[in-house]
Image (tube, coloured by chain):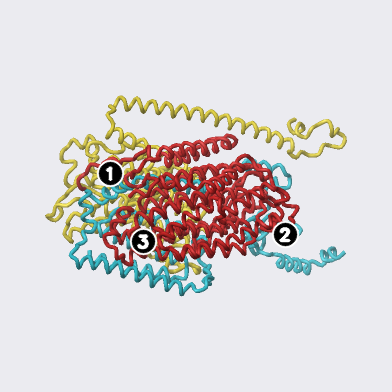
Chain colours: A red, B yellow, C cyan
Amino acid sequence: MGVQLPFPTPQIEYSLLLPVLVILGAAVVSVLIEAVAAESLRRTLQPLLAFGSLAIALAGCVGLWDQRQVVAQGALVVDGPTVILQGTLLILAVLGALLMMESRVDPAGDPFAARASTIPGSADERGFGARRQTEVWPLFLFAVGGMLMFPAANDLLTAFIALEVFSLPLYLLTGMARRRRLLSQEAALKYFVLGAFSSAVFLFGSALIYAATGSLDFAGIADAVSADPTSGLLLSAGVALLLAGMLFKVGAAPFHQWSPDVYQGAPTALTAFMSAATKVAAFGALLRVMFVALGGAAWDWQPAVAVIAGLSMLVGAITAVVQSDIKRVLAYSSVAHAGFILTGVLAASPKGLSGSLVYLVAYGFVTLAAFGLLTVVRSPAGEATDVQQWAGLAKKSPVTASVFSLLLLTMAGLPLTSGFTAKFAAWSAAWGGWQTGVVVIGAVSSTIAAAFYLRIIVSMWFSEGDDAVVVALPGLGTRTVVGVGVASAVVFGVAPQLLLGLVDGVGVFLR
Amino acid sequence: MTFNDPFGIIVVKVLGIFVLLVLMTLFTIWAERRVVSRMQHRIGPNRTGPQGLLQSLMDGIKLALKEDITPTGAHKAVFLLAPIISTGPAFLAFAVIPFGPEVSMFGHTTPLQLTDFPVSVLYVLAVASVGIYGIVLAGWSSNSTYSLLGGLRSSAQMISYEIAMGLSFVAVFLYSGSMSTSQIIEKQTSVWFILLLLPSFAIYAISMVGETNRAPFDLPEAEGELVGGFHTEYSSLKFALFFLAEYVNMVTVSAMATTLFLGGWRAPWPLSTWAGANTGWVPFVWWLCKVFAFLFVFIWLRGTLPRMRYDQFMRFGWKVLIPSSICWLLIVATARALRNNSTMDTRGLLVTAAVILLVVVGISAVVERQRIAATERDEAERGEREARSRRLFPTPHAPAAASAAALEPGEAHDA
Amino acid sequence: MIAVFWVCAVLSVAGGFGMVFSRKAVHSALWLALTMINLAVLYVSQQAEFLGIVQVVVYTGAVMMLFLFVLMIVGVDSSDSLVETIRGHRLASVAAVLALLVLVLTMINQATQSLALNIVPTGLEGANADEGGNVQGIAKLLFGRYVFAFEVTSALLITAALGAMVLAHRDRLTRVPGQEELSRERLADPATAAGLPAPGVYARHNAVDTPALLPDGSIAENSLPGALVLRGTTHDVREEVAVTRAAELASDPKQAQEEQS
């Protein structure tokens, strides 16, 4: 046996990792609570733990505001974009958790199945009644923990593991809806199979990039790329596969096939959290990879991203027009939004970074609120998600109808809403980066999207509705979520400098 | 880390190991029959050769000459392949087992070990896991329900017990700082690991019985339920190969236990004071004694214990063996880390350990009290239910003359 | 070393082909196991001992075994459906294979180019010598540079375990009666107090799928094991009963008269 070399103890900057560590630690504690506490105790203890840890993590995140440092032996980076993305994710997580707790809108209980293991429609399932599966809380916390790591990851290996850490719980939670369980389980299976496939693609891409550059570190890859700007086939193939893996998670066309089914099948509270937070986390990581590691090869990936951005916007907008289910409408609109955010990525400049970040923050709150609002419009069979059922909603509940109209208009990008601010920020960056073609496509698809948003609004206000559809009075949690969404839409729309200033202040990625 | 032996020496070592294993198999089969007979107040085979020693050889020849049957529905190629896959790895594992220190062999000085490399203990695990294929494929290819069930059981059983086995190795790795068999033996010069790591040894000793499908864990071939399990449909030479594999595996796991915990070929304490005890060919004798001690325990277990039920067996593996080995590993690792890094002296360590132990005992006492209370509640409930069912016990109808209302059915029964 | 390469390389490629062209899933699994073991040997011969052995323990020993476990339940006789449901599947596969081929050739080209530039690859031997061994080198990376990723993997494992629990396990709403209670319950009913009638008591069959006959010649349905009844694989004895009955009646005219009246 060879000589025993002294092993240097790895340096872990615990204080700088606080948000991630608190959430993952809470998740582990939460699993322990599942193991030892009685069911009645768990029902109060688990949400308390979740909210408590989210609050501590958020406070820790604020404390990291001025930190610019590579931490944990180079695994993660704490810099401006990391902090703002982690902060956004944590707030979205708090809101998502509020939706998950909601048990007043549905007389059958909270959004999740009483026991996910019961066979749908069996006597066993009915026997559990309105009881709760408290295991959703540890799963949720693990997902949040993974999401916090993903945009901060500084090498492809950590990025991959973070990706898996947040994906796996989401696959599980997708299949745990209380109502329409077969649809939910089908969605979970689709999500899992396609997600596992995309993870494999991501990993294959990482391996090829390693083969081409000899490094997994973003900084190392960047050095290798700038040393040899005539990127070989290996690097191009690696980047293409890596991009495909990440674009799957953000749901950009043509990697969006899963998203309508999953958004529709998953419990709406989870869809709300997932659609907002997954996008923030995945775009954060995508931005870091593209800007830090592959910034030197921007000329190579820009055409591909431009095509994908254009395709996403058009496919999302056009397909949404023909949907009859409101969850699918929102799913396709999220595909279009992925395209809009990609225009910001396309600029490959600090302006593009801040434009994308602004878009992510604005979009996240609005989409969470929109999905949150879906839960209150109900028919006897559960949520009334058919567009037809939403007709004449204004007569039943003017407040719901007007709030939903506002959220839709924000998504369409009406001036004086945060949607306009976001689109302006992303497009001006792309325009400045000479990506005029994509901006034009963006404008066209925005118009198409506005058409179908308006169609829903018109049907809500100006047509007769179905009497079986009622608007349930939600609990404080859902109201908070919707309120925050509306507030963000208005405040960031009327006073865009608040958001722009915040994002501009964080600076660029640390190398 | 090969030993730079000339080709001839390697051939001699390979042949030596092969012959040794076949001889040990024949001897163990004979020993098993004699020892179990003894335990059952019988005599056992004593006619063929001195003390019946040649009995297993004769049986082997007879077995090989029997008709070789391949069932109609069987998958022929895999059916033939399975016993080979099962036997091959069993022999392969012995490549890294040290039998003794450096000896002189035809003028060459070479260790009494075929080869060694930095991960040779893991190699044994790997080879064992390939051996499972043989059993699983035998079960599948026979196209018989008994065989299939036996094959499924055995794969589940071996994978489960391999985890506990692997975990018990880790403590040894921590103490020896190596995964090579010869290094591990070297680290046991002063004290054997069985003394330092008794729980690890216990876990290994239990899981090695599960790993070799021996009683009381011989569920894959449980005669009573599965008519022989995975080898139900096998006959003649193919069956003999399975038989051989089982006994070679027994020898292998015994040799591993010897290597990892009993100092390998090192002489036991009073003998080790004699300088010649750990040099030359003499240590091979100590090695042989230790391995035979383990083999005797195997036989003893078979003669003594009834077979476990399958669910109890799996529960034991997953809920007792694996958690306890993880806990033990945690303790070992903590102790090592404290020894290496902290300034705490032995007394401080012991005091801390005592405090932790007290806390653990306290918590478990509370949990146990709750559990007892719950059990009592359950018992009371059951008693009530039984009382109810007793009332429902069918009693003959009372004669019409007797007043039916006078007696409750239950009371009638009690009376 | 060259001999090891040629033997293992040929076998592992053969295993790959075998896996793709096998018509039975179990065969494919076995071919894949062959490939994996040969790759492991190649790793070991390239000084990556730890990787090679772990490849066998984890992939061949555990992952493939679990695959096999599932496939085995299908049974020997059944043939897998070979209908291709995806249109253009073959064309896409060929395209993907060609693309991969180009990729691999590029990689080889790159490697040979660096050889031409007199950059001699040191292989793992160099790295192993630097770190004091293969295991030590991997340990240093795993617990040094990548310690965070390594630790976070535990979150993944916990999630997986928790997910398996959530999807497969639930608390029982009612207490499941145990052996003792079931036997008490059975004794409580005089009809079954002496046990259910045993199956197979019929002149021509004695298997468990054959029902017992009651004294009057009718079939005792509860003598059959429930599992067989559910599967519908019980032996139908009605015809045989009828034949026997007819023969009895023919031999005993008095009884026949009684039956008719």
Judge from the rendering whether residue A36 lies leftward or rightward of residue B333; answer left or right: right
Task: Report the chain holding disc 3.
Answer: A
In the image, B149 versus C6, the foreground residue is C6
* Mark 3 lies on residue: A298
Question: How many numbered circles does the render carry?
Answer: 3
Q: Position of residue B188 (x, y in %)?
A: 24, 40
* Label 1 neighbour load within 10 Å: few <14, some 14-19, many 20+: some
* Label 3 neighbour load within 10 Å: few <14, some 14-19, many 20+: some
* Picture disc at residue B289: 1
* Picture disc at residue C219: 2
Q: Which image quarter: residue A101?
A: top right
Q: Please, what secondary structure does the residue beneath circle 2 have?
A: strand
Task: Report the chain holding disc 1.
Answer: B
Image vertical order of residue C164 relative to residue A66, above or below: below
Residue type at tag 2: Ile
* Residues behind callouts 3 and 1 on a single chain: no
Task: Report the chain holding disc 2.
Answer: C
Question: What is the distance, in whole Å, between disc 1 and disc 2 at their CAs?
Answer: 64 Å
* Picture disc at residue C232: none
Residue type at tag 1: Cys
- Can residue B298 be spotted in the picture? no
Q: Position of residue C160 (x, y in %)?
A: 47, 49
* Residues behind callouts 1 and 2 on a single chain: no
Q: Please, what secondary structure does the residue beneath circle 1 have?
A: helix
Judge from the rendering whether residue A114 lies leftward or rightward of residue C145; answer left or right: right
Question: What is the distance, in whole Å, between disc 3 and disc 1 at their CAs?
Answer: 71 Å
Judge from the rendering whether residue A73 lies leftward or rightward of residue A487; answer left or right: left
Residue type at tag 3: Ala
